[in-house]
Amino acid sequence: MDNESQMVPERLDFIRQMVADDLEAGKWDRRVHTRFPPEPNGYLHIGHAKSICLNYGIAADFGGKFNLRFDDTNPCKEEQEYVDSIIEDVRWLGADWQDRLLYGSDYFQQMYDWAVALVKKGKAYVCDLTADQTRDYRGTLTQAGKNSPYRSRSVEENLDLFARMKNGEFPDGSKTLKAKIDMSHPNINMRDPVMYRILHASHHRTGDAWCIYPMYDWAHGLEDSIEGITHSICTLEFENHRPLYDWFLDELGIYHPQQIEFARLNLTNTVMSKRKLLQLVKEGHVRGWDDPRMPTICGLRRRGFSPEAIRQFCKLIGVNKFNSTVDYALLEHCLRDHLNAASPRVMAVLNPLKVVITNYPDGQVEEMAAVNNPENPAAGTRKVPFSKVLYIEREDFMEEPPKKFFRLAPGREVRLRYAYFVTCMDVVKDAAGNIAELRCTYDPATRGGDAPDGRKVKATLHWVSAAHALDAEVRLYEHLFTKENPDEAEEGKTFLDNISPDSLQIVTGCKVEPALKNTRPLDRWQFERLGYFCTDPDTRDNSLVFNKTVGLKDTWAKVQQKEQA
RNA sequence: UGGGGUAUAGUGUAACGGUAGCACGACUGACUCUGGAUCAGUUAGUUGGGGUUCGAAUCCCUGUACCCCAGCCA
């Protein structure tokens, strides 16, 4: 990420503009310190990547610091598994928190002490109202709430009660600590919000040390304050909470960061809510959190996305304060852009059609030199074995080709990439009339792929030598959802009804060139003329599995579509 | 009908009172040992209505639409 973001961009997004203004005004002693504060209750997705890139990017751009902090204030929902995955994903994306891997739960004692301070100040009280009663007293959007009957307890009584809450003397839900603000405030968040609830639950880090846990509104600003965060960047739905964030910090008289809100990311043809993602996993609509169709970071990683592509995407989408939905095509553009530059090329045939070169010597094998990456000469070349029996892509041959099809057809000459010109002389069919094999001749003078007489061919095909090819399974993916907006469902239907039946297609019996023999999980390749692929972790020594990351742009497919229409 | 936000091509984003620009997509064409990549070009926009101004996406007034908030979730 460093190279990309070292320079302050010429056009600043509105948040960077605020940071730049603060810097110029000498605010915060000219420090910049951001953080990414996930709750460890789910896996990170591409929307989180936007936040990570924003926060880390700002720190990097302005020479500041970046913290990774777990907002782990609710023991009921949080698990170590999520902590581990988040750490892995943030690191993979390239954000560097140095030695600042932090946990909100580490500040529980400080938060408690501050709560006591607010009680002493007469700004917080212990309330015995039940959850239902609390809702009732809160009023509605258009009607003021009313004061809790416990609101006027003495400081001494509150201190005593709060201490006993902490000591575990009361059952879950029987009491809360509330801030004493204004029950008729037009902003509902200011109507005596709960600061602590009683939860006799074991926390993934603090164990049973606590049986009262701070609420987000109380805890979050304190965490930012303790860490000396300058710009506390969060999503839009917390805008309504900012007055409360400010109120707590001001009443306490402690260091006060600036909260800034931005719009979360929406992407076409996918869902981003934790609830829906969890549902897809739990109900088995996908194979897990890291299913390559998932917009999770681990899913994208397994699909073959590179961190560079995701970062570039996050840079291009910008930052704003209104809801928008980014076209998935932009993500794919960023993906192809980086993969084109970075992926070694290799030949693989997904749907093999046997080709016999009739005039090629039996048993002869030639090593053809193939370029590993035309975008990067330093990647060098490799040898690809060529012999009498080959496989080509079934779609690269048509017995009766339409006008715009310029691949192989009876009597037609094409180039086999890095090898020879071949001409189709005969089509062999099985009993059912299916094409079983092609018999071709080659022109020895075209070795390497060029004709000395200067004649041209319209097409170049990829191929593999049958005797040398490795078998592979290839998993093809399409959008998980057929609709741009999966939530757009008819009466009685849900986003689940919009799951695409074609989102996963498993192709077996694929033939790949021997260079792929020792590939490791997550290696990224371009299968020439097909697209970008990634070695799946399911790969074993004798069984290769690849995921299709994204296809190459396919002009022929467009032509076909148009002809059909 | 309370409060808080937001509206710029199909999509995403710039323009900070002075030529509405960029990217993606779509469409043409050139080139090509990947129908890839690359290159050139075309397409298309300021939420409606008033006002201020020599000049308004930008300032003012007034509509409209959309998003968020009534968890002891974050």
Image: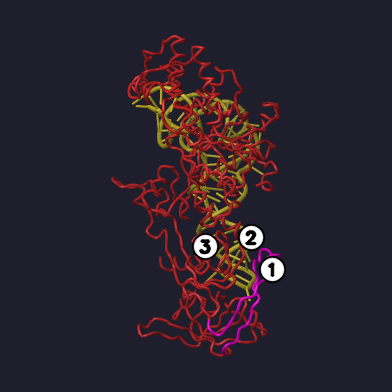
Chain colours: A red, B yellow
Q: Earlier in the sequence, mark 1 or mark 2?
A: 2
Chain that bears disc 1: A
Gap between marks 1 and 2 measured at Cα: 14 Å
| Nearer to the camera, A128 or A511 | A128
Relative vertical location of residue A19 with respect to residue A143 in this rendering, above or below: below
Q: Earlier in the sequence, mark 2 or mark 3?
A: 2
Chain that bears disc 2: A
Residue A501 appears left or right of A229: left
The verdict on a common chain for dots 2 and 3 is yes
On the image, the x and y values in percent for residue A31 come to: 68, 30
User: Badge 3 is on which residue?
Assistant: A551
On the image, the x and y values in percent for residue A40 come to: 49, 39
Determine whether the residue tagged by mark 2 lies in a helix, strand or loop. helix
Residue A380: assigned label: 1
Instruction: Spot the residue most to the left.
Output: A492
Q: Residue at x 44, y 42 (%)?
A: A274
Relative vertical location of residue A241 with respect to residue A488 in this rendering, above or below: above
Q: Residues within 10 Å of mark 2 (few under 14, many from 20)?
A: few
Determine whether the residue tagged by mark 3 lies in a helix, strand or loop. strand
Q: Residues within 10 Å of mark 1 (few under 14, many from 20)?
A: few
**Residue A383 painted magenta:** yes
Magenta span covers which residues? A362-389
**Residue A255 painted magenta:** no
Relative vertical location of residue A101 with respect to residue B50 in this rendering, above or below: below
Residue A151 appears left or right of A551: left
| Nearer to the camera, A411 or A512 | A512
The answer to whether the residues at label 3 and label 1 have Cβ atoms under 8 Å apart is: no
Determine whether the residue tagged by mark 1 lies in a helix, strand or loop. loop
User: Badge 2 is on which residue?
Assistant: A341
Which residue type carries mark 1? Answer: Gly
Which residue type carries mark 3? Answer: Gly
Which residue type carries mark 2? Answer: Ala
